[in-house]
Amino acid sequence: RGTVHSWTITHHAFHPGFKGDLPFTLLTVDLAEGVRMQAQARGIADEALRVGLPVKVGFEQVTDDLTLPVFEKA
């Protein structure tokens, strides 16, 4: 669990693997453990984003060999 520190909405894929996800929201989150982490937002409307928004980490299986963290509203 953590809180939103900042975010950006990405409209340009800097790697072809992300082109199908555009636009996507990348959150920077202050985790309860005291570290800062970045991952894509899932299920959070851009209008709902604010500094301090409580979020939790989830995991999204991309392929059989790759699972990525994502942030969801807590």
Image: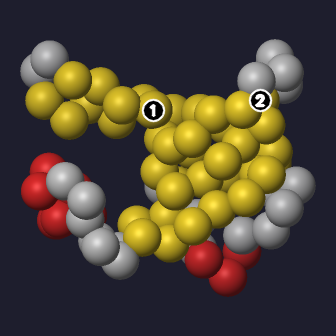
Horizontal relation, residue 29 to residue 57: left or right = right
Q: Residue at x 17, y 65 (%)?
A: 19
User: Mark 1 is on which residue type?
Assistant: Pro
- Relative depth, front residue between 22 and 62: 22
Residue at the spot of label 2: 31
Q: Residue at x 76, y 24 (%)?
A: 35
The image quadrant where one finds the N terminus is top right
Q: Which residue lies most toward the bottom here? A: 47
Relative vertical location of residue 16 with respect to residue 36 in this rendering, above or below: below
Q: Which residue lies most toward the front here? A: 14
Horizontal relation, residue 33 to residue 19: left or right = right
Badge 1 density bin: few <14, some 14–19, many ≥20, Cα 10 Å: some
Q: Position of residue 26 (x, y in %)?
A: 52, 56
Labels 1 and 2: the sequence-earlier one = 2
- Relative depth, front residue between 41 and 28: 28
Q: Marks 1 and 2: CB-CB under 8 Å? A: no
Element on which disc 2 rests: strand
What whole-number distance in Å separates the C-alpha atoms at marks 1 and 2?
A: 13 Å
User: Mark 2 is on which residue type?
Assistant: Leu
Which mark, by number, is residue 69? 1
Q: Position of residue 37 (x, y in %)?
A: 63, 34
The image quadrant where one finds the C terminus is top right
Q: Position of residue 66 (x, y in %)?
A: 21, 23
